[in-house]
Amino acid sequence: MPIRFLTAGESHGPELNIIVDGLPSNLEILPEDFDIDLKRRQGGYGRGGRMKIEKDKAIFTGGLRLGKTMGGPVSIRITNNDFKNWDVSMSPTPQDLNDPSVREKIDAKFISKARPGHADLTGAIKYGHEDIRNVLERSSARETTSRVVAGAICRKLLKVIGIDIISYVTRIGSVSIEDDVLGHDYLSLYKKAELSEVRCPDEKTSELMKKAVDDARSKGDTIGGVTKIIALNLPIGLGSFTHWDKRLNGRIAGALMSVHTVKSVEIGMGKKVGELFGSQVHDQIQINPEWKNDRSRYKRKSNNAGGIEAGMTNGEPIVCTVATKPIPTLIKPLDSVDIKTKTNTQAHFERSDVCVVPAAGVVLEAMLSYVLADVVLEKFGGDSVKDLVDNFKRYQEYTWDR
């Protein structure tokens, strides 16, 4: 793949590390490009105490000079402020286990009670751990901070050719608002959503969603929801139909499904296509008389396909609907097992959010940005931003004349 990224680090470890490889040279990357999305990820109604501890800041450690990429890998780190409270129990280096004070700190963080819905039990069995701490530290959603950083870089690359990625929330628990009510002025909806604590563009629905979160909190429970993730201003022809692993819808679905708590991904109409006739599903095509002011002379009368046909972009917005489950750490723990004592018990509870749906949209934006940046470079190539832009312009001229 043209772009790839790797992350390392644990939830309560010293820091998070990110390496993004495959970027063209002379792409401007500034601290504020990261800070905005890192702050958005930490916000949202229903977040827990950890967000008050961490004030995430991206620190560049390689690949940039004077604010621009040089063509090599870009490396970034984010310090975990909470590590000062875990410096012994989460130390990367060996500790003197014969020291009673050291032993006490490590034992205090030992976990053997698994949480249903989390990686705890399966991860402990798979990797041979007695202490579930070794599983949850990496499987924690703290890892998504790194994805947001990688996604912010990819988002900056996409903006060079005018592609925007946005999201907003349409459901939390039983409270929802339909697309027919919201309409399809996506940029306007996004701007309204950014003013909402639950990232919903409708003010009345936002208040009802907050009440649903409050209700879950009062019961010691958690709550999930649904988010729309949308890509705008796409050219025709990203992705391919020639092999299963080149189809863009599959690549997008895989990336979005990899995000913590995500349980379903729909593109366009999604599951509704199984309920309707073909005449109600497929997007009819027409010539756009003002095509010179757009990216293609061909337009669709609808966008039921969600911007993707046969694994390729068709010029319409990519529209994904993603459902995220309630997180598995409950104030009132669920029934579970203790893998040390081999007894039935209740699940472990540590610090927890009640609802992560508003924040999940920011992570999903990052993953969609990554996939699209990857296929953009795959399609247009170039070792520098200038090469990319020049190739893109030539392709646009070609598609205008088709």
Image (cartoon, rainbow, N blue to C red):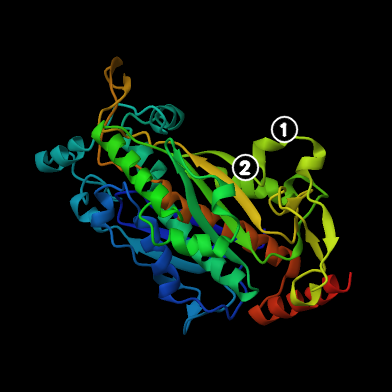
Q: Is residue 225 above or below residue 187?
A: above
Considering the numbered disc 2 on the image, is that residue within a helix, a strand or a loop?
Answer: strand
Q: In this rendering, would 93 be left or right of 374? A: left
Q: Which residue is mark 2?
A: 266
Marks 2/1: CA distance? 12 Å
View extreme (right): residue? 402
Label number found at residue 274: 1
Q: Nearer the viewer, mark 2 or mark 1?
A: 1
Residue 109 x %, y % = 22, 38
Residue 291 x %, y % = 80, 72
Residue 107 x %, y % = 19, 35
Considering the numbered disc 1 on the image, is that residue within a helix, a strand or a loop?
Answer: helix
Q: In this rendering, would 154 be left or right of 39? A: right
Quadrant (top left/top right/bottom left/bottom right) for the C terminus: bottom right
Residue 95 x %, y % = 22, 46
Amino acid type for the residue under numbered disc 1:
Gly
Tell which of 216 and 49 is nearer to you: 216
In which quadrant of the rendered view does residue 102 lie?
Answer: top left
Label 1 environment density (alpha carbons within 10 Å; few <14, some 14–19, many ≥20) = few
